[in-house]
Every structure is written in C-alpha cells, then in structure tokens.
Image (cartoon, rainbow, N blue to C red):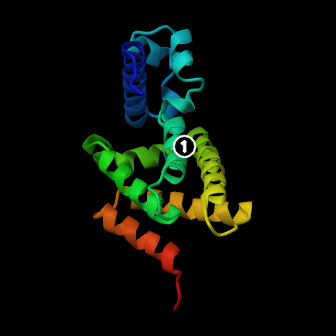
Amino acid sequence: MTMGLRELKKQKTRKAISDMATQLFIERGYANITTAEIAERAEVSLPTLFNYFPTKESLVFDEDAETEQKLVAAVIQRKKGQTVLKALLEAGLHFLDEIPESHKKNFKKFMTLIESTPELNSYSKQMWLRHEKALGAAIKKETKKKLTSAEAEAIARFVLDAYHRSLGVTNAKAHLKALFGILEHGWSE
C-alpha cells in the first residue's frame, strides 16, 4: 500500500517537528522549551501541533506507534518456517540499519535527556511496557510452544532490552546477536 502525497507530507512535517523539538530539548532542557515555542519555530499553530503530538512528551517519541507496529509485524509476518526469535533478531538488525547517522551520534545526549527528565523517563517506561505487552501477545499467539502471558511478556522484555542495549555501543549488530544467543541457548556458568 502506497502513501498518498498528503499523508507523506504530514509524515515529513511530523518528523521535522519532532526532530527540531528534540534538538531544542537536548540543547536547552526539556523544562525550558514550551509547546508554543515549538509551534512557532515549526510555523504551525498550537492546535495543529497538538494534532500531530497529543502531549509534549510525545514530541520526543514520534516513532512510538510505528515501532510497536513493526515489532508485532516482525512476529506475525515472519517468513514461513522462521522462528519467532529469528524473526525478531532479523527485525532488530534491520532497525539498527535504519538508524540515521545523526541519531547514532546524538544517542548519548538523547538518552541523557530521557534519563534526566522525569516526564520523559516516565513516558519512556510506559511506552516500553505497552510495546512489551503488544509484542508479548504476538509471541504468545504465534509461538509453537504454549506460553503463559507472563512468559511471553518476559521474552518480549528481553528482546526489547536487547534492542535497547545494542544502541550506542560499538559493533551493535554483534552485540545484539550475542544477546539473542543468550535467549536462544540459555545461560549457564
């Protein structure tokens, strides 16, 4: 399904606003930037800004819904005969390839912003819990082995944590593969 010009323009505008807002938050601090200032700099009205982003926190996490959709799709739309775990590893490697160089360079600053801002830290945790539940439900539904919701969500948490831990490290792909190896083969002393 292709996206129409109007939707493509809206998507580009949304991304540009989010990138600009995030950069301002990193440079000047989250509390020091108002949504009115962001709207003015983006040359949109405040109501239009809130049509794109329902909360100030969502300006930073502009890919929230798309990320969750991609996670679930990796499981549900995996290749025939491919295990859920292999599909999630492949998706993680693909996510790493998609990260723009500018984002990779600013990763530590971005994480400092998230960790040092209570509102963003809380939003981030809630977002990852939503992703964990959605991914856990997909894993439970699609896996051959019967899993409880708690087991499926624990696997989802490990997968999401492996993705997160692989960001901002040297040789991220090897790091991600090593973490998935622990999940696939277990750990012993």
x, y (%) of residue 87?
45, 59
**Is 110 on the left or on the right of 30, as rendered?**
left
**Is 51 on the left or on the right of 173, as rendered?**
right
Q: Quadrant of residue 91?
A: bottom left
**Is 186 on the left or on the right of 27, as rendered?**
right
Instruction: List the single residue furthest toward the front.
Output: 80
Q: Quadrant of residue 175?
A: bottom left
Q: Label 1 is placed on what type of residue?
A: Glu
- Say above or below: 87 vs 7: below
What is the count of numbered marks?
1
x, y (%) of residue 80?
46, 58
Residue indicated by mark 1: 68
Query: Foreground: 116 or 110?
Result: 110
Label 1 crowd (10 A; few <14 / some 14-19 / many >=20): some
Q: Quadrant of residue 54?
A: top right
x, y (%) of residue 37?
46, 16
- Say above or below: 49 vs 83: above
Callout 1 secondary element:
helix
- Say above or below: 155 vs 167: below
